Amino acid sequence: MGRRSPSTRLQAALAALAVAAATGVILTIPEASAAVAAGATGYASQNGGTTGGAGGQTVRATTGTQIHAALCGRASSSTPITIQVEGTINHANTAKVSGTSCNTAAGVIELKQISNVTLVGVGAGAVFDQVGIHIRESSNIIIQNVTVKNVKKSGSPTSNGGDAIGMESDVRNVWVDHSTLEASGGESEGFDGLFDMKDNTQYVTLSYSVLRNSGRGGLVGSSETELSNGFITYHHNLYENIDSRAPLLRGGTAHMYDNHYRQLNESGINSRAGAHAKVENNYFEDSKDVLGTFYTDAAGYWQVAGNVFDNVTWSPKGTDYNPAGPNPTSNATVSVPYAYTLDSASCVPDVVARTAGAGKGLLVSDGSCTPQSPSPTPTATASPTPTATASPTPTPTATTAPPSGTNLSIGAGSDGSSKADGTSYGNVRDGNLSTYWSPAGTTGSVSVKWGSPTTISSVRVREAAGAGTVTGWRLLNGDTGAVLATGGAAGTATFPATALSKVTFEITGATGTPRVAEFETYA
């Protein structure tokens, strides 16, 4: 397949829809009428789950300004709310609204510093025309049954840095479902990514959605050193006429299953900088270099099973270009901590065509290759081809004496979500109590990592004096996202012996900015 310019290979823009009124009445409607499918799937079901605005008020909005007004009208920034959207959202009707429970901006749907929100298209549909959705410093967000199109980063008008949906800065638990994300060209035409995650974004699922006609499908991590993102699931999506980044993974763990990839023009799933991708039962069609490590010598990893490669071409390997084909085989084992059911790859094009995208009635598949209405509660079962399973969440065992044996953190690597000025991730593994790491605020995470799986069964976190103290924490398996232990004050915790390449100490509460002097690990 030859290399073509974005202007010749990408489809023309969709016709502009009628412009809705910039203002209008927000109608409070019965909660029972909220058209939200039940049950987040994949990694969005982990870390406490993703429920959006469940249990809160339901309102109707027909403009972007009304969406912002609904957010700003809540009692607090975490008060649950479901916002049903109908009509065309554009720059003319999307203004900034102020309030103590919101932080909005004009020309973009700003979901910033908030939690517990569902945004769902209803009725004749919701179209965000040249207006992107920006999620920043937020958690527990559901976006469902919407179309976001032609969001630009250059030219006019611009919105959201050119991303249809963009997430950044300590984002947790986002589920985007049955949505259509599309552009009308590549970077030279003013567009950027359709579904981007960076700067410590974790526990995200993209399901039953369409991504089309764009130079870039999406990324996880903004650079080779920005590796704080991960635990992403992509299933039952259509990627169509995408040049590259389907997606681009920089570090972290991602799970792709039952997706239909058609006309990936330059490259597809780009696993690099230590990323781990579990790629199973997908259908790749009329595409080039659909899996590998591309445009870098920083290797990524993958586990493949059950995929179909239909008219896929492969380039020769080079120093910074490593396609997985022409006969893709696994170079790692990647486990996931949740249950799921696979459709056969052979029926994926049909199932995805009938279920993916906005306006498809929220139909799903249960592994029988037959679209159906979602059940009131999730009924997922375990994968028929599971790999390793995550250890159950144990109750941490607090002890007064430190663990015995060798501190395995000495000589290991480290990274984290953020760091205060003058501190370093490496300070938690140097054996020196006078040096320390602090997050940029009162919460954050720091990880110890090894080049190969290492078995540990206890950790000891030692704080330096002179700042806030930790009041809540979680210990995570960095390979799978599984919770190994939780607790209040920092100290020692034990758990069943677990082989992993990365372990993360996540601070969920503190009296001020904490100082972690040592993050010790023991077998």
Image (tube, grey):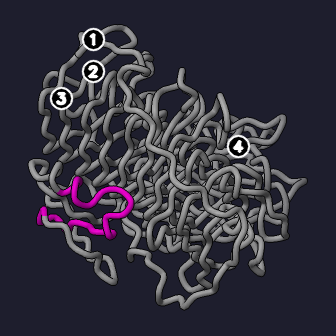
Dot 2: within a 10 Å radius of its alpha carbon, few (fewer than 14), some, or many (20 or more) residues?
many
Under mark 3, the amino acid is Pro
Give residue 418's mark: 4
Could you tell me how far apart the alpha carbons at marks 2 and 4 are, in whole angstroms?
Answer: 32 Å
| Residue 442 position within the rendered picture, expressed as x and y whole percent measured from the top left | 78, 57
Q: Are marks 3 and 1 in contact (CB under 8 Å)?
A: no
Q: What's drawn in magenta, residue-wise? A: 351-369
* Foreground disc of the pair 1, 4: 1
Q: Are marks 1 and 4 in contact (CB under 8 Å)?
A: no
Mark earlier in primary sequence (3, 4): 3
Q: Nearer the viewer, residue 172 or 161?
A: 161
Left or right: 41 in relation to 152 = left
| Residue 61 position within the rendered picture, expressed as x and y whole percent measured from the top left | 62, 72
Look at the image and say whether residue 367 sits in the magenta stretch.
yes
Q: Nearer the viewer, residue 347 or 476?
A: 347
What secondary structure is the magenta-colored segment mainly?
loop
Could you tell me how far apart the alpha carbons at marks 3 and 4 are, in whole angstroms?
Answer: 36 Å
Mark earlier in primary sequence (3, 1): 1
Hey, which quadrant is residue 380 in on the image?
A: bottom left
| Residue 46 position within the rendered picture, expressed as x and y whole percent measured from the top left | 45, 65
Q: Are marks 1 and 2 in contact (CB under 8 Å)?
A: yes
482 vs 228: above or below: below
Q: Which residue occupies 84% across, 69% down? A: 99
Q: Nearer the viewer, residue 249 or 422?
A: 249
Give residue 317's mark: 1
Report the residue marked by disc 2.
323
Under mark 4, the amino acid is Ser
Dot 1: within a 10 Å radius of its alpha carbon, few (fewer than 14), some, or many (20 or more) residues?
some
> Residue 181: in sight, yes or no?
yes
